[in-house]
Image (cartoon, coloured by chain):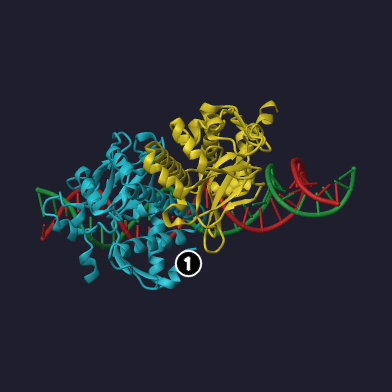
Chain colours: A yellow, B cyan, C red, D green
Amino acid sequence: MTQARVITPLFEDFAKVEHHHQLACQSCALSRLCLPLGLHRDDLTKLDQIIKRSAGYKRHQILFEPSSTFKTIFVVRSGSFKTTISATDGREQVTSFYFPGEFIGMDAIYQQRYLSTARALEASSVCELPYERLQEFSATIPELQNQLMTRLSKELSSDKNLLLSLGKKTAQEKLISFLLSLSQRFSERGYSSMSFQLTMSRGDIANHLGLAIETVSRLFTQLQDQQLMSIQGKEVTILDLPALKHRCG
Amino acid sequence: MTQARVITPLFEDFAKVEHHHQLACQSCALSRLCLPLGLHRDDLTKLDQIIKRSAGYKRHQILFEPSSTFKTIFVVRSGSFKTTISATDGREQVTSFYFPGEFIGMDAIYQQRYLSTARALEASSVCELPYERLQEFSATIPELQNQLMTRLSKELSSDKNLLLSLGKKTAQEKLISFLLSLSQRFSERGYSSMSFQLTMSRGDIANHLGLAIETVSRLFTQLQDQQLMSIQGKEVTILDLPALKHRCG
DNA sequence: TGTCTACATTGATCCAGGTCAATAAAGTGC
DNA sequence: GCACTTTATTGACCTGGATCAATGTAGACA
């Protein structure tokens, strides 16, 4: 119960600190996870001019979709998002979830149009990085260019790991891998890695992992029965981390 | 039969033109698909200095693996490669196939170590782009930086599409999507999009699509029976493109 | 030219996880 | 607080594609 309070919604505390949303990168609590990482103070000041802190997004609100014109890469400031990609017949695949400090929309650089649709999972806010300006700046700030490449490469890495999950893992292994990767990301953001709130629905998780909702639900009960973790609604508590790590492949 | 001759191995003709393998980018037949795209002539000359044209790789030979130290990004010059990622217990997922002009190893930028293992599918050759030098050069050649980001983003896009395939498509849809994407890539390289040689085994295709070899084999027979395409060994001929497009989701 | 070995096809059987259906919680708005 | 809607759980049953098994085919190399 006490853990739950601090993480609903994610980074709520940071959002509150920002009385208006033009808080400079220098004083942003996220800077250690975000674009500013490794940038010099003066470079950051320059960058600060072009970054637009957007108003908040409500649960389910669309951040962008394939029909939107591509101008910016988004960074999650608070809350969380999901991206989905659609087949021609309307079937959708949830490709990623995004938490504070993570970049959304990088797959649009090639072809200069968003490939996917991004939706807020809860009340959330973002910073907008105008891509063209970012490119100009990268020419004079090598560390910025490095930062962008690293982010792209990081997303590539996690997609490849997801490919391994979807292609080769059992339903239980998929779910455990997913939960452990969430745990890892929460811990990087200063939250408990052992107890956290899911911001996405069972449906989103199932879809992301190529499973049916019912399978996810059954696996949750099964993991509880095996004393590996406890799940009450959206709250996940990891009980036996070594056993879980052992079971995720 | 006539089509088959020109594509075994892929870009064989280019390989022959290069009597030694220090052919400059400017005179390389691939330049239109490769890094040089959009670069100024003088920039290309500079870049040429740092690109190492490596000796050939034999079928099944390893280009890199996770234990290799990351220093370079590879560009396929001739032939083709596959990359695989491994679970802790040894299960492998074929994450991508790479053809001439395509970049291998970009997922290593984050963490500075290769995530996957790359193997030649046939007698092949590559150019090596030392990553650190590439970074230095990007600072002064904005178009190079743009080129790299675009390549990363392109790989991201194709991985997301594969996620859709693995997560939401039926076996037949997966296979058709895969074959059509190959067809597209062959056509970009100046080959027939209607008739081409598979350079990978049934096992590689099955693994890549999260299927069993037997399923792939059965689907091939089924696609032939339905007069949608003809498959004799490694040679694929597309007979009814509209019908195939309709069936791939 | 024949022998090996790896790769591919085809058939029979099985099962992990999907689908369908009913019920139960948990939000959400009035 | 109550109605309504969305989300989650649980059970019964079914199926697409995996697995097992046998056979066929094609390179590789002596």
Q: Say whether residue B9 is left or right of residue C26.
A: left
**Residue sitting nearer the eye, B39 or B124:** B39
Residue at 48% across, 31% down = A246
Give the side of residue A35 with respect to residue A229, left or right.
left
| Count of marks placed on residues | 1
The secondary element bearing badge 1 is classed as helix
**Residue density around tag 1, few if under 14, some if 14–19, many if 20 or more, within 10 Å:** few
Residue A156 in view here: yes
Residue located 65% across and 43% down the image: A122
Give A150 or A168, whichever is nearer the viewer: A150
Query: Mark 1 is on which residue type?
Result: Arg
Please tell me in which quadrant of the rendered image residue A79 appears.
top right
Where is residue A223 shown, x and y percent of the image? 60, 35
x and y, in percent, of residue A99 in the image: 56, 39
| Residue A62 point in image, percent of width and height | 61, 52
Q: Position of residue B248 (x, y in %)?
A: 47, 64
Q: Chain of mark 1?
A: B
Position of A216 relative to C8 (above/below): above
What residue does disc 1 label? Answer: B247
Residue B178 appears left or right of B77: right
Q: Is residue B91 visible?
A: no
Foreground residue, C2 or B19? B19
Q: Quadrant of the N terminus of chain B?
A: bottom left
